[in-house]
Image (spheres, rainbow, N blue to C red):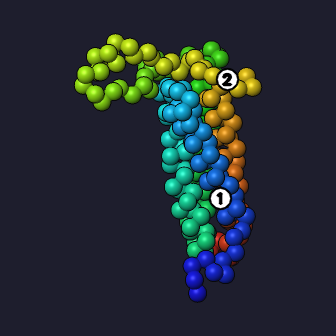
Amino acid sequence: MKFGEGVQRGTDYQLGALALFLSILTIATALGFQYIGGYVPCMLCLWERYAYYAAIPLLFIALVLTSGGHRGSATAIFFLVGLAFLANTVLGIYHAGAEWKFWPGPAACGGGQALTTTAGNLLNELQNIHVIKCDEASMRFLGISFAGWNAVASFFLMMIAFAAALAGREQRPETAAQNF
């Protein structure tokens, strides 16, 4: 029997694959705006990426476990990913609220700009640094900033991950469900 042969890909697998695809798409978009579009991220923007950096390998592992019939472990991973995106949703709302001046952003929020590695340009770079503030949106699309869109994306990814966890619990055999 070959790996994956005879394995049924249930709803948990499909939802996990969707979450993985959307996570990769979201972080690739953020990196594209940074490196191609020239939008320098602030400290909170960088923090908001951590959920994606953690979720992508975890979702891949969960998909492998689901394919191998280890749905209990995959369910736990889907649940952890859901929690990560729940925290990221809250962080995105906080960040967007700071941009709309609903509440103050963190006092230490600035930076996010990389320094040159060339010794000759170091002094020029230090003199020309501009602080990227967390309470100023660098761009808005349909009236929503990057932080706001991240909150929306994180919310949907949270819902997908939790749905995958619930689907995994429902699709496991009874004996495995009793051991969970």
Q: At which x and y percent is residue 178?
A: 63, 73
Nearest the viewer among 113 and 49 is 113
The outermost residue toward the left is 119
**Residue 30 location, x and y as percent?**
57, 36
Query: In terms of depth relative to the viewer, which is nearer, 88 or 123?
Result: 123
Sequence-first tag of 1 and 2:
1
| Residue 72, visible in the rendered structure | no
| Residue that extends furthest to the front in the rendered view of this protein | 120
When asked about the image quadrant of residue 164, the answer is bottom right
Looking at the rendered structure, the kind of residue marked 1 is Ala
Task: Report the side of 179 relative to 144 (left or right).
Answer: left
Q: Residues within 10 Å of mark 1 (few under 14, many from 20)?
A: some
Disc 2, SS: strand
Q: Residue at x 66, y 77 (%)?
A: 7
Q: Position of residue 28 (x, y in %)?
A: 57, 42
- Within 10 Å of disc 2 (Cα), the crowding (few <14, some 14-19, many 20+) is few
Amino acid at pointer 2: Arg
**Residue at (62% x, 42% y) in the render:** 26
What residue sits right under mark 2 in the picture? 140
Q: Which residue is mark 1?
A: 17
Viewer-proximal residue, 121 or 164?
121
Where's the N terminus, which quadrant? Answer: bottom right
Q: CA distance from mark 1 to mark 2?
A: 29 Å
Work out whether residue 173 can be spotted.
Answer: yes
Percent from the top left, x then y, of residue 170? 72, 67
Image vertical order of residue 146 relative to residue 4, above or below = above
